Image (tube, rainbow, N blue to C red):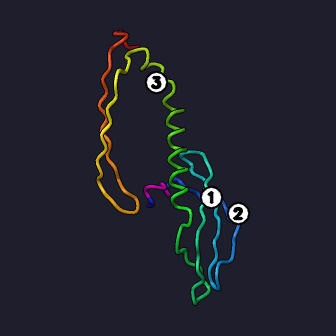
Amino acid sequence: MEQRLNFQYMRFKGISTSEKFGNNEVIVTGKFHDIQLDRDFQLKLRMKELDDGKWQITEIVNVVDIVIERDKAVSARLAELNKEIKVKMNNVFTVKAVKTEAKNVRKGLLPVVEFTYTIDYTLTNSKIQ
């Protein structure tokens, strides 16, 4: 999960809300800034109070939503970074067909799928700049 959310790029910015949940539990919404994407994410953390008065995180409540939101942000960022390259590539070749094959690598709560792409193309310009 740590790799999926890229916690190494997340910086804690503060608490935006907290809501009591049960006798010794709260749901705290923390604001985290992803320095790689330059974007903020709201993580909802379920916490319980321990006997010594300290608090322990027991669950990231909105983990699926954050993974989806972050994936969309990564796709948008990559599209932005690759825009100029795509224009240059379109001047060199034209894609005729794309075939995609998916293979389940790992099943479970967060499955891993491996994709293989086969691209049929023709050169439109033999002079690469």
Name the disc covering residue 128, or none.
none
| Residue range corresponding to the magenta coloring | 3-7
Q: Is residue 109 left or right of residue 82?
A: left
Q: Main secondary structure of the magenta part?
A: loop
Q: CA distance from mark 3 to mark 2?
A: 40 Å
Whole-percent x and y of residue 54? 60, 82
Q: CA distance from mark 3 to mark 1?
A: 32 Å
State if disc 1 and disc 3 touch (CB < 8 Å): no
Residue type of the residue flagged with mark 3: Lys
Q: Secondary structure at mark 1?
A: strand
State if disc 2 and disc 1 touch (CB < 8 Å): yes
Residue type of the residue flagged with mark 1: Gln
Whole-percent x and y of residue 19? 69, 73
Location of residue 28 (image quadrant):
bottom right
Q: Which residue is mark 2?
A: 16
Q: Is residue 43 magenta?
A: no
Q: Which residue is mark 3?
A: 86
Name the disc covering residue 42, or none.
1
